[in-house]
Amino acid sequence: MAVWNCLTQTSDFILLPTADPGWLLVEDGVNPAREREIESLFAVSNGYLGVRASIAEGTRFSHPSTLVAGLFIMDGGLGPRLAVLPDLSHIELKVEEERLSLEAGRVLAHRRQLDLRQGVLWREWRQQDSSGRVTRVIYLELTSLADRHVFLQSVAITAENYAGTINLAARLFPSNAAATDVEQVVTESGALLMGVSGNEIGIATISEIHSSIGVLPRYETGPDSRVERWSWKTTLGETVRFDRIFTIFASRDVANPARAARDHLASVGVHGFRTAAVSHVDAWRRRWEEAEIRIVGDDEAQRALRFATYHLIAAANSADEHVSVGARGLTGEAYRGHVFWDTEIYMLPFYILTDPPTARALLMYRYYTLGGAQRKAKERAYEGALYAWESADTGDEATPRSAILPDGRVITILTGDREHHISADIAYAVWQYWRASGDDSFMLEAGAKILVETARFWVSRAQVESDGRAHIRQVIGPDEYHETVDDNAFTNTMAIFNLESAADTVEILQRERAADWRQLCTDLHLSGKEPTTWRALAGALVTGFDPATKLFEQFAGYFELEEIDVAAHRGSATPIDTCLGPERIRRSKAIKQADVVALSALLWEKWPFAVHEANFRYYEPRTGHGSSLSPALHALVATRLNDRTLAQAYFRQAAEIDLANNMGNAAGGVHMGALGALWQAAVFGVAGLRVRENGIVLDPHLLPGWSEMAFPLKWRGRLLRVRLQADPRRIEVAIERGDELTVGVLDGPACRIRGGQHAVFHENGSGWANWEIGQ
């Protein structure tokens, strides 16, 4: 497959693929059974616009779609879901009137490459038609990270062994358009205006074909500008390049989407395709400089972390505070585009420590949907804010009420009614962002309101009973195999965190931002007694912790349930809850995902090492990992416990959720929460990062085979670079940008360094005993 070597900047393409194969995700051949999975993994997106990596000319087995963040439609009684727009990349080619297709003729070569470093999808295809003519086609596609309303496509077509006529048709509405949610299309102001369930989408496009004799004219435009056609006579071996620029706006962005698309296209067109493409690559270069984790000694881990980081960068948009990242990002339609706790607990730490403006925007989405959370609480006779378990554009509960199982049974979905820990999860994320960023303006504008309203919810939700303790009954914790349980340890402990952090916030803002706080206090109708009530409730809540055994009981009565050999089911293609059935799974100790173990991952410094050890050893063998969110958190906690062999096994399991499709559902989009958790497993687990009030602390445990690990992170306006070595054990922390701070090793030395300095810590055989500072 040496076709890529044929590319030159002057003749075929403006860009070239990254030369280092470690940055390329490659799929050779055509496998109809895996096509939809590949479309998800190789998707290009930029936080506003997502385009699946479908076959441009269309096939029976693909599922192309274009997704716009925050563009939801109502789907009958099922509620809101992301709208599916037509496939922007669709192109049809004919050679002497014979259509080129993977399903006709002979495929000589076919490869797709996702260039993770540049955010570019490449496709190479060599096709022999029924007359023996061989055509080579190479595609480039990207959604611009520099200009999120822009999609670029370039196609180089080469007649390898013939001279003749080639026809190209670029259709905005291919034959599968009926599968989209577009209701009507009109031409307005030089752009297409689509109606999508009360929303409007404006799309403008400009295309050019470049040949050895110059730019070729378009010879036909279809009705309403929905199809453009070119035809040319090619000479033997000649390459012709087709470049297309799209601009896209939605009515949720601007008042007149068609005009905005047309005007923006004119602006982009002045500078041309080359400038737009180079700007995109430069944006990715800058983003990687402040996000890349480098691993030496484990190519699989390096590939997995690059894949995770690529999709995390591609999923979010710092410029839009009214959208968040759904469970599958903009790579597929699974979970209907809804936002879960995945964003705050599993993804947000990546943004907090590599791209704080994006973290802020994602939390502002929760602020702007606070009204939906308050409505949900009120509907259930609670105070404050109960956030939707599945959220869309308004913040109102979007969880479907029922689902149909593969065997045809209809089941009731209770998570929307009972999975209340979501409010505490969001409060946790607010506090972590503030702690790491020092962004007081966010706290005054939005964060304090979220903390106060969620604390008020827990006051109304928990009940002090005859035993003198407070209980939260009839909930669902992260372990969704067990529904409507009492005193779930995760829910109650996170509620305690929520209550205490709300009280702490009041005290800090009263002390340090008194003038601002007085106005906020008025806006919130906050009484002076409320923080005292929050602290009292936090002290009264049952957590299920037994000091004698050091174990948290996952929920009241869990320890009396039936023991099940969960490990015996882990290798089965059938999930354990399906094998056992709903009734038996509820009577068993089998756990869907990290629940108590998740508490260790989130609140490590709240309890001694022995508590984490006891709970991990008890719950790990009982966890079936029926959720993609589970393996990476187990990797994180196992690493902190220095069980590096088990941690590596869980790290690989998490890495393969998408890359090996080990859960069998990647066709619906990549698992964004699992990708964020994998990043956490590396940074919080392997590197052992702890964020403190005055700086950072590290406790590294490099996994087997990892000789070195390096990564950047941002902390309160500073850009730091961390480098860890295994043999000899060594830690280096440099401040590339920003003021001085304290860096240290857990249970070891610490020092303060200034901008431009670095600290190096060495191990002397018995511990981290010495350090030095350099420029």
Image (spheres, rainbow, N blue to C red):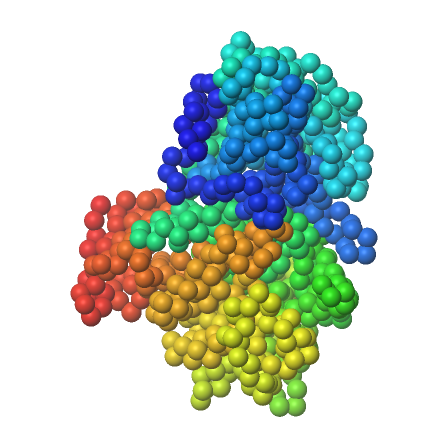
Q: Is residue 461 left or right of residue 708?
A: right
Q: Is residue 687 above or below residue 166?
A: below
Looking at the figure, which quarter contains the C terminus? top left
Residue farthest to the left, as pictured: 764
Report the side of 247 relative to 661 (left or right): right
Q: Residue at x 66, y 86 (%)?
A: 465
- The percent position of residue 210, horizontal first and vertical second, equals 55, 16
Query: Residue 768, located in which quarter of the rendered image?
Result: bottom left
Which residue is pictured at 78% across the width and 22% down the height?
223
Quadrant assignment for the N terminus: top left
Residue sitting nearer the eye, 80 or 438:
80
Residue 385 percent location from the top left of the image: 67, 64
Position of residue 30 relative to residue 213, above or below, is below
Q: Is residue 656 above or below residue 580?
A: above
Q: Residue 679, percent across and down?
A: 45, 55
Seen as rendered, the residue at the extreme front is 131
Confirm whether residue 669 shows in the render: no
